[in-house]
Image (cartoon, coloured by chain):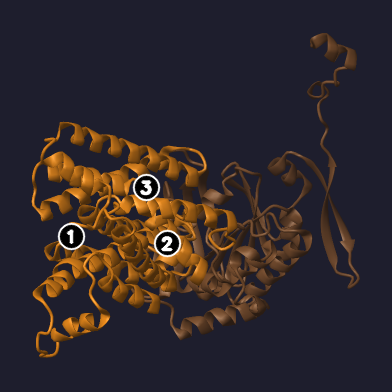
Amino acid sequence: MIVLILIFILSFVLGRYSVPPGQLLEVLATRVLPLEQRWSDTVETVIFQVRLPRILAAIMIGAALSTAGAAYQGMFKNPLVSPDILGASAGAGFGAALGIYFSFSMIGIQIMAFIGGLAAVALTYGISLRIRHDPMLALVLSGIMIGSLFTAAISGIKYIADPYDKLPAITFWLMGSLASINPQDIYMVVVPIMAGMILLFLLRWRLNVMAMGEEEAQVLGLNTRRLKAVVILCCTLMTAASVSVSGLIGWVGLVIPHLARMIVGPNYQVLLPASILLGGGYLLLVDDLARLLASMEIPLGILTALIGVPFFLYLLLNSKWGWK
Amino acid sequence: MKLELKNLSCGYGRQNVVDGISLEINEGEVIGLLGANGCGKTTLIKTILGLLPPHGGEVLLDGKNIKHWTSAQIARVIGYIPQMHTPPFPFQVLDVVLMGRTAHIKPFASPSSRDVKIAEQALEMLNISYLRNRIYTEISGGERQLVLIARALTQQPKILIMDEPTSSLDFGNQIKVLSHVKQLAGLDLAVLMSCHFPEHAFLYSTRVVLLNEGRILHSGPPAEAITAERLKILYGVEVEIISVRNRLNKELKVCIPSGYQIAEGDLTPAPKSDQIYALA
């Protein structure tokens, strides 16, 4: 929590246009206190129009992807799944790319992303049920297959997209970036992400029971069909909202729930809050790195994979806590 | 409370695995369900629990058909203890036991301190309070089975159903678990458990039900119901049932396999080494 707040403040201060911490506090304070303006308008623009939306977006998207990952893992009783692996991200990406291609509004793009994500998860899960092998492996495999199917479809859209206008938009957005975020985007995604998060948090105890397996959960008194539908809808909604503003940001939804489980254990009563805090802090930190590491912005999706993959391998090789 | 099966048929898909079973279980009884692999024990249990829809007949609790009950309603009356398993996530033992309270908790709520107290009492009753803060995936198989029994008790059920609760447990743990099961019947619970060994039924059940190819072959007190002829029908092997007396001069029965002749044609003599060379 404290670390998150520290990263939060640091993120305002750091950047191409530097803002001293004292000035930052003053500018923020004017929103509640009537203070005399002792700074340039540029500072105010940088803080409120550029950095604040971006910081909020990073925190929300990191938290959303991590929460969705944690919930998916319990729901499918499978510690190896995440929004990316289930194909939800690719499906949402396809929907959003289609939305961009047809020049839909932000809401239109989000709805398309949601439909795409939901279709992908439904396909993945449906296929995995028909594979009569190790169910854990079946789910991961069918997710990878559906994911590549939708990725191919995205490439198809890129191929037919207008190379001067739509193609660059789709390409940059797909790489995952928060650079072009504006305050309006924040308003658009805050509702679906908060709605999904709150509902999942309310269901935290049921998620615990569900993680014991569907049949057992039903015998313990859960309406597993309804619960599963609600949780999958929530997770996909959050993933789709994230993807529609930030593009494909991989690995957060797999790595952060594992890290959180290592720190606080598998009980969703503490695992969900931990995933939210860690996910938000992690993506904010990575986004800061994306802004600062090179003179040119590095796409966020590239960095999360570069950091996430080795980190996940480390967890795989060293974890006693992750699973089993 | 009384659990009643009336002419119950059930199975997977359209095929009937269990065919027209009628059975009554009352509180204080421990029913041992005996039968070969694939005779329909697990299918029957799943149907009673509402996991499979019955193909015909009824499951009645105190005379009421539970066909349209929600899973929460059923879970408040019937507790289920599955075969030993390992979940993928390392939950704390107390959390696993608390999951038994799920049917009593509102959809958006978490267990209260009252629920924790009920779970702790269940752990105490089974003498496993020391496991409270341990990790469920790291304790032994026998301990895990006792935790699952504790979980079923926190459901505060009237009926307990167990599917081979002692499979994959060692000798000592089998006896520990079964002794606890017998103790539970004293709490006015009705217990239905499927079991592997006729001897377990002799020792720990008040009545046995012999299930053969989806039908009840016989049902009655163990000493009367389990005979060499019936075991031969059930399992296809010759068994001798011998009465012995223990230190307390109590009569006990044991089953000793007396002969399963492997037909001569079934055994091919191992090829001699020169024949193997010839084949190569």
What is the quadrant of residue A44 in the picture? bottom left
Foreground pick, B145 / A112:
A112
Q: Earlier in the sequence, mark 2 or mark 1?
A: 1
Q: Chain under label 3?
A: A
Q: Judge from the rendering whether residue A299 lies leftward or rightward of residue B165; answer left or right.
A: left
Mark 3 neighbour density, 10 Å: few (under 14) some (14–19) many (20 or more): many
Mark 3, residue position: A86
Q: Which chain is brown?
A: B
Kind of residue at disc 3: Leu
Q: Which chain is orange?
A: A
Q: Is any atom of residue B63 visible in this view?
A: no
Mark 1, residue position: A181
Q: Chain under label 2?
A: A
Foreground pick, A65 / B264:
A65
Same subunit, tags 1 and 3: yes
Could you say where residue B52 lies in the image, as x and y percent from the top left?
44, 51
